[in-house]
Image (cartoon, grey):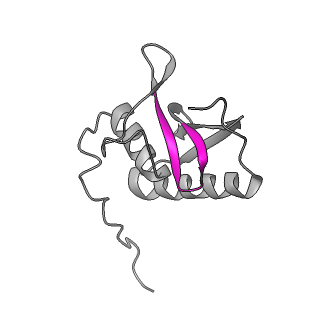
Amino acid sequence: MSGMPKDPPEPMKHHLRQRLNDHARSRWQLSGVDVRFRGGFAYVEARLHGGAYARLCRLRFEGLPHTLGFAIYVPDKGIYQDSLLPSGQPSGTPEEALDCACAFQFADPDAHTTPPPLLTNRGDAG
């Protein structure tokens, strides 16, 4: 690695927030995620129903908008630890990183192999 990654442009930040929130709601039924940026890193927290928050991971911008380095948040130590995704790679898509972090934080070790739940329309058509 060569030094601190560069801060991504605003459109890339907006796109990342949107992708992560869409995936968090559809795959994990979270209220959403909060993403804050510092330098070339994005820090991701889950917004749980009821107003609680859970730190998930840190993403590192590596120059490509769809491939980000990954560090999991380790609550017992209070640190972000560089980690591999289930693919065995140290970087991947934002959705892969979110799935890995949620599986770890919410004790769902098979999340990366389980398809997302089907969304059904629970309302009756008038």
Which of the 4 image quarters holds residue 18?
A: bottom right
Q: Relative to residue 55, is residue 6 drawn left or right?
A: right
Q: Residue furthest top?
A: 77
Whether residue 37 is visible here, answered yes or no, is yes
Q: Residue furthest bottom?
A: 126
Q: Is residue 49 above or below residue 38?
A: below
Q: Relative to residue 11, is residue 61 drawn left or right?
A: left
Location of residue 49 in the rendering, given as x and y in whole percent from the top left corner: 50, 42
Location of residue 10 in the rendering, given as x and y in whole percent from the top left corner: 76, 53
Q: Is residue 73 above or below residue 35?
A: above
Q: Residue at x 37, y 70 (%)?
A: 122
Q: Residue at x 54, y 33 (%)?
A: 53
Q: Which residues are magenta?
A: 59-72
Q: Relative to residue 36, is residue 28 drawn left or right?
A: left
Is 67 in the magenta?
yes
Number of disc labels: 0
Q: Residue at x 42, y 14 (%)?
A: 76
Location of residue 34 in the rendering, given as x and y in whole percent from the top left corner: 61, 42
Q: For the N terminus, which image quadrant?
A: top right
Whether residue 48 is visible here, answered yes or no, is no
Q: For the C terminus, which image quadrant?
A: bottom left
Dominant secondary structure of the residues highlighted in magenta in the image: strand
Is 97 in the magenta?
no
Q: Residue furthest right?
A: 10
Location of residue 123 in the rendering, given as x and y in whole percent from the top left corner: 41, 74
